[in-house]
Amino acid sequence: MPSVVIAGGGLVGAVNACFFGQIGWKVTVYESRPDPRGRCLEHGKGINLAFGCRAIGALELIGLKERVIEMGVPIREKLRYQGEKEGVFEKVQTLNEGDYILSINRHRLSQLLVNEAVKYNNVKFLFNCKATKFDINSETLLVETPDGLVTVDGDLILACDGAHSSIRRSLLKHDRFNFSQKYCDIGYIDLSVKIQDTCELKLGIHNSWRTDGVILVALVNRDQKLTGQITAHISSETPFLFLVSMFANFSVFEKYFSTPEDSVEFFKTRIPVVYGIMGEKHILDTFSKNKPQAIISVQCSQHSFFDKLILMGDAAHAMLPFQGQGANCGFEDCVVLQEILEDIGEDLLANAVKEYSRVRTNDTNKMNQMEWDAYVQVSTYSCSEVYAIFLNHELENHKTQWMHTMKTLLKKKLEFFFPSTFALATFSRTPYSEISKKRQIVLKGAQLLIIATVFALFSIFAFFFLNELSLKSPSSEYNL
Ligand SMILES: Cc1cc2nc3c(=O)[nH]c(=O)nc-3n(C[C@H](O)[C@H](O)[C@H](O)COP(=O)(O)OP(=O)(O)OC[C@H]3O[C@@H](n4cnc5c(N)ncnc54)[C@H](O)[C@@H]3O)c2cc1C
């Protein structure tokens, strides 16, 4: 039986463990943190995940689709508040009737995945074990366990140890391996709170508030009771989880949230609904304990090494979260690897490892770039609103009513011919590189359209102007 060693038992590591468990490989997962099944809900990076068909498709293949859907909340509508204005309802951009985003609790999902993986006798999770590096000379992994440093090896080694991957760091001297990382200026903080009473906001609606450079995203989830194994226990008495993530430029955090008291003041005066739900004590507690976290984007020039090691998930392609593709993409990595292994065969593992990098590197880098572009456009959009509308259908900031109406009309027209990047990435498995190509065509087309429109208007104006001139000119009268 071939063996696979997985460094990192987070989302992507655990999904990989399920896949390899299913096909009978000997699987050992080394996870630096304690067992998530023994921990209560933790605050961390974006407490909820938005899943589209890439992630759900992967979960279906490991037999978890139904349970995850049961645990999650389908999101079909957005309610957006801009400053003091009334909230505006909008449908989530989809490809097909019936599509929706599944909002799923990250921690619960992590517990579910570990539980599922360890059902296979051939899968072992070792917690509190940190993979410190990949030794390039011996082509083995060094792991710090509670009993000391050990060297481990397998037919295949998967580095699923997240955005700050130790394994990737140990590869930096590998010939012709290029790696880049960028932090964006926007940070985030989780403000989620458990509430017993009914909530003023509706279940299953993506609420967002934009004010003074702050974007607040809030969802109401039913909580799931946890009794050893995960069971989705949903009843009207179940407490609600009010999930709030706040995004802002670091300078905005410094301006309005430098002390916990300032933060309370911000919510009280600018977003009173959220203030009312969270309560002063929770805001004070959160801002005295938690600081805004930075968001990193990582790109690699190759994902596989030495015919046996593969970087996967955030270790290979951590991306900004504005289109919600990080975990979706990471789960799709696992599916792609299984598809390649099935096509090429386990006997030719080295070929499969090479093929994975060939297929996946360009694709994931393209999505990474699209996430970055979306962020740049949102933060520098003031250049030209009309241009911005063409550039990215998802842009939110419209200052005037006419701009909003025009944007909605253009969006509908554009989406009819060219589904948005978001819709294609979320609701189809169209390769990211193809989506990127389509997007470039739309951008070029839009630019040409703008140039042609300006040219046509100028020609019409020039024609009438010259005509008028020639009619009025005395010489023309004499000529007649
Ligand atoms: C604010 C925010 C919101 C997001 N929202 C979405 C969303 O809505 N939808 C979406 O699809 N994606 C979203 N993402 C992206 C998503 O969180 C990541 O893409 C996903 O968590 C990647 O999974 P992973 O397993 O590769 O890495 P991680 O989830 O980071 O897991 C890595 C695991 O490896 C362990 N580890 C780390 N180092 C070592 C080591 N040296 N040895 C052993 N173990 C190690 C860690 O403890 C962890 O368990 C969001 C990200 C952020 C920051």
Image (spheres, helix red, strand yellow):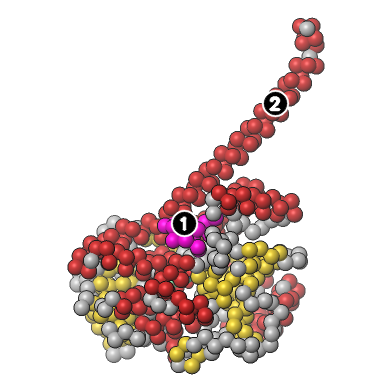
Q: Mark 2–mark 1 contact, CB under 8 Å?
A: no
Q: Earlier in the sequence, mark 2 or mark 1?
A: 1
Identity, as a three-letter code, of the amino acid under mark 1: Gln
Q: Which residue is mark 1?
A: 369
**Residue 260: percent from left, percent from top:** 66, 80
**Residue 449: percent from left, percent from top:** 59, 39
Residue 171 seen in this snapshot: no
Residue 256 seen in this snapshot: yes
Q: Which mark is residue 209?
A: none
424 in the magenta segment: yes
Q: Is residue 97 above or below residue 385?
A: below
Residue at position x 75%, y 74% from top?
A: 269
Q: Which residue is mark 2?
A: 462
- The secondary element bearing badge 2 is classed as helix
| Foreground residue among 394 and 35 | 394
CA separation, marks 2 and 1? 42 Å
Q: Quadrant of the C terminus?
A: top right
Q: Residue furthest front?
A: 97
| Foreground residue among 341 and 471 | 341
Q: Quadrant of the N terminus?
A: bottom left
Kindly indicate the quadrant of the structure image that contains residue 86.
bottom right
Q: Is residue 475 above or below residue 38?
A: above
Q: Quadrant of ligand 1?
A: bottom left
